[in-house]
Image (tube, rainbow, N blue to C red):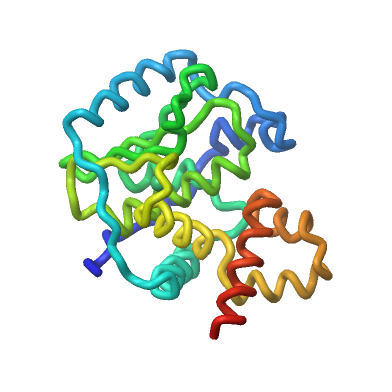
Amino acid sequence: MTTHPSVSCAPAATPSKEDQNVLGRLGIPGPKEAPDYSLRYEQTIRLKDHYQSMEPCRVSKASISRLAEELANQLRIDATTDFYALIKANGGRISYVQYDELKAEDGSIFIHTDRTFDVILPIYTAPTRDRFTLAHELGHYVLHSPRERSYALRRDSTPVEWEANWFAAGLLMPEKKFLQAMAETKDDMSLLAARFGVSRQAADERLQSLTQSKAGA
Ligand SMILES: [Zn+2]
């Protein structure tokens, strides 16, 4: 695998718009950005005709998890980490798409020649889901970005997407911390999910994946 680009975590000086969004904090979806959001989406999505789809790095799930966990440790990722700021600090821009425009291109990433990238998020999704999506896109950036002018669409169920999901799970829910928290929360999955700032579904899937890897070991 190629060396991943250096990823830095700039301290968030002021609370982001998302953090100030009380409804968002309560998990109630609301408008996330200025109303010109779809303009950038329209511009970005057109790049598909000129960019190539990303290729998998084809390393094992265990290696990808390890890399993500190292990064999580380095960046001190926890439930309070502002992924919007993290994406922005690494050259990413986030644009939003309305549900009715959402032709399954939510959670897409476009990496440009100058190592900047655009991420597309749906406008009405829970903050926990968005966090996972942003971690997933960061996974593409770390694992699949040596190829410039490239893109990945989340709707595709391809090795590229699996790899980004493995990365996101490892980044947000490092194995050791996750298992430790599971013991502490006494298998209360909702509480466990809240500890890591992920959705209940993401926590369930992480548990399943860790149990399977143990059984297969
Ligand atoms: Zn993806």
Residue 129 placement: quadrant: top right
Residue furthest to the bottom in view is: 217
Residue 148 x/y as whole percent: 17, 46
The x and y percentages for residue 6 are: 29, 60
Looking at the rendering, in which quadrant would you find the N terminus? bottom left
User: What is the number of callouts on the image?
Assistant: 0
Give the residue drawn at x 39%, y 74%: 63
Residue in the image at 67% along x and 51% along y: 201
Residue 31 in percent (x, y) is at 59, 21
Q: Quadrant of the C terminus?
A: bottom right
**Near-viewer residue (195 or 103):** 103
Give the image quarter of residue 24.
Answer: top right
User: Residue at image x 63%, y 72%?
Assistant: 177
* Residue name at image x 59 percent, y 68 percent: 209
Left/right placement of residue 96 relative to residue 114 reads right
Nearer-the-camera pick, 92 or 2: 2
